[in-house]
Amino acid sequence: MSAAPSPDSENFDRFQGTSEYIASRALIDAVNCALALERPLLVKGEPGTGKTLLAQHVAAGLGMPLDAWHIKSTSKADDGLYVYDTVQRLNDARFGDGDVKDIRSYIRLGPLGRVFSAKDRQVLLIDEVDKADLEFPNDILHEIDEMRFTVLETNEEVVAAQRPMVIITSNNEKELPDAFLRRCVFHFIDFPEVEQMRKIIDVHHPNLERTLLEQVLVKFYWLREQKELRKRPSTSELIDWITALVRAGADVKSLETEIPFMGALLKNEQDTRAIQSFQDRGGKTPKTLDEIGNARRR
Amino acid sequence: MVLLDFFYTLRDAGLRVTLQEWRMLLTCLEKGLHKSNIEGFYHVARACLVKTESDFDTFDVVFAQYFEGIEGAIELPQELLDWLADPKPFEELTEEQRLALEHLDIDELMKRFQETMAEQTERHDGGSKWVGTGGRSPFGHGGEHPTGLRVGGPGGKRTAMKVAEDRQFQDYRTDVALDVRNVKLALRRLRQLTRSDGPEELDIEETIDKTCRDGGEIDLVFRPKRKNNVRLLLLMDVGGTMDPYYEPVSRLLSALHEERGLRDFKAFYFHNCVYERVFTSGNLMRKDSMMTADLMRTYGERWKLMVVGDAAMHPSELTSARGNINARMETETSGLSWLNRLEQHFDRGAWLNPDKPQEWAMSATCRTISSVFPMYHLSIDGLEEGVKSLVGARAATVRPVMAPGSSSLS
């Protein structure tokens, strides 16, 4: 079904995916919802399914600059707004450097602060929000809702002239608070099906030989089906693996019988051993996608 | 308001959709983001209303049931299907032509379809009214109409109903199975942070304060890092009726062993019920045992007690003074008394039962035990509840009390 844009929908920017990022219809719909509602977009999904990449391409697709806030376990909500560098000021006061009287020169805006004070609408990526303390998402709630905050030391208010598009990614390490979730538009990046994976590989390796691609996909999806694996290989690992295969000039014949450069796909000793012993026992990997079953190819 | 009904249906199905989220969805619909088709509506609704992939499946089920009538519910004559199975190529539409086509809502579309069906008597290709192929009528397939209804033939895309009916997110449900990673996530909550001892970190606030008091002479102040203060004691039922649950229980155990956040963790085993002795290994040999009284002396009331067992046994094993199923093990006190003592001794305790909650009420011993310990299902959701009751605020420890004899339990 193709759709004519309805008159109301012209009022805001629209994301359609970019030539280098293959987005599913559901993802495009979610991004546009977030844009229209001016709400943060929360993106979850298996590691390596392109959550972080999404922000870069949303920014590129909308022609907006991107600012990123990479969350660590030590990140505090206040770091995102601004940091008052007391230690520097203390040091300057003692050794007589810098303009100690002007408190402004010791206020450094964080990513949220920078995006709010920017003139144009920007995209802000808050990467891996679940890495921080449990309370972290609640702490930034108010600022993201209101898009304003006050620098206490100078009593100046930073207000966003244009509400930025906020994209938040989570690896599911921690549960996010309900109050936070209520305010977000949510998208879960499901693992790509074979057809979509072909398109994704096309973007990264446009000249890959068809027969090789076929075998690569067979091996990859077969590996993902193996229940013993502790960590299933992801899209980004598949891309790396293909790069390794292409560089080494691997041919289709060798792929039919073995899995070269397994280290690019499996990052866990037990997993490598499990597959190794499967092959040592004379186990055969399938040669066509049909042998894997239809589960992944609806 | 067909849609408002959908909201309540979702809530009835257990999704905690709030008004705020509902308004988000309505705003999106006002802006036409669903592009007037059901697939778009499915995506937009899911993005606005569902905030975790573990609820996607529930959403799919409700969606498929609720909107079942909108697609595929029409009886089609075989003749019509035959025409449609053999499509004619489609002429490109110009932009003006496309805009000129009417936008129809689904009710009107259905009505018109039924009317057209009643009138139509022959094959059509490329027209703009009749059901056929390659045309601009809202009905048929291989054609183009902004709010068209596909009738037979291959669809260009997977439709929302298909997505919903496929239930591809079933694996992400959290009320079903445990995997080690999920268990670890649930266990993350098992923490109470305190600053007591251990390695120190710079206390900036204090440092500045002190430095100012000393007239600018920098004076560094340190304080202990925040540390998890939770000590967990695990008692596990092994053998017999617990054998079918070997997988989930061993996953729980390995997740607990890998959990580095805990201040201390100890595991003991028992069979059916706790009596005089608990065992340090799963084969329950006397040489690897510890008197239960010693257990309580060794582990103070600050330890959190987690019991894993199906609480299913012969009633006498629980209440009789000589109830131990293993006759060679001395028993003078009933298992129930031991359980009561454990519950009294430890500040907080929770019982995780791998049996389905619906089955609990059927076992008399399970009913009795759940009146001693708060009982939770050994699933991700149950584990989270249980962990909350171990470390959460006091008020949160509402026990899912099951009165003896009551048969309904959610």
Image (tube, rainbow, N blue to C red):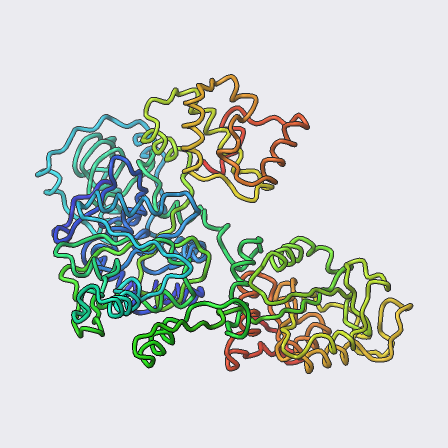
Quadrant of the rendering where the N terminus of chain B is positioned? bottom left
Q: Residue furthest left?
A: B96
Quarter of the figure with the C terminus of chain B: bottom right
Q: Quadrant of residue A244?
A: top left
Among the 4 quarters of the image, the one containing residue A176:
bottom left
In the picture, measured across the screen, residue B251 lies left or right of residue B193, that is: right
Which image quadrant is residue A228 in? top right
Give the image location of residue A134, x and y in percent: 43, 66
Q: Is residue B294 above or below residue B43?
A: below
Q: Residue at x 22, y 65 (%)?
A: A106
Estimate the x, y position of residue A31 in percent, counting from the top left.
27, 51
Q: Look at the image and tell me whether residue B405 can be seen.
A: no
- Residue placed farthest to the right in the image? B328
| B78 vs A234, nearest the viewer | A234
Q: Position of residue B117 (x, y in %)?
A: 26, 42
The residue depicted at 26 percent of the width and 56 percent of the height is: A166
Left or right: A204 in relation to A219: left
Report the side of B221 relative to B178 (left or right). Answer: left
Residue at figure coordinates x 34%, y 60% from the top left: B49
- Relative height, residue B176 to residue B357 (above, below): above
Q: How many marks?
A: 0
Q: Position of residue B252 (x, y in %)?
A: 62, 58
Image height of B253 relative to A22, above or below: below
Q: Is residue B198 in sight in this rendering? A: yes
| Depth check, front residue: B48 or A46 | A46
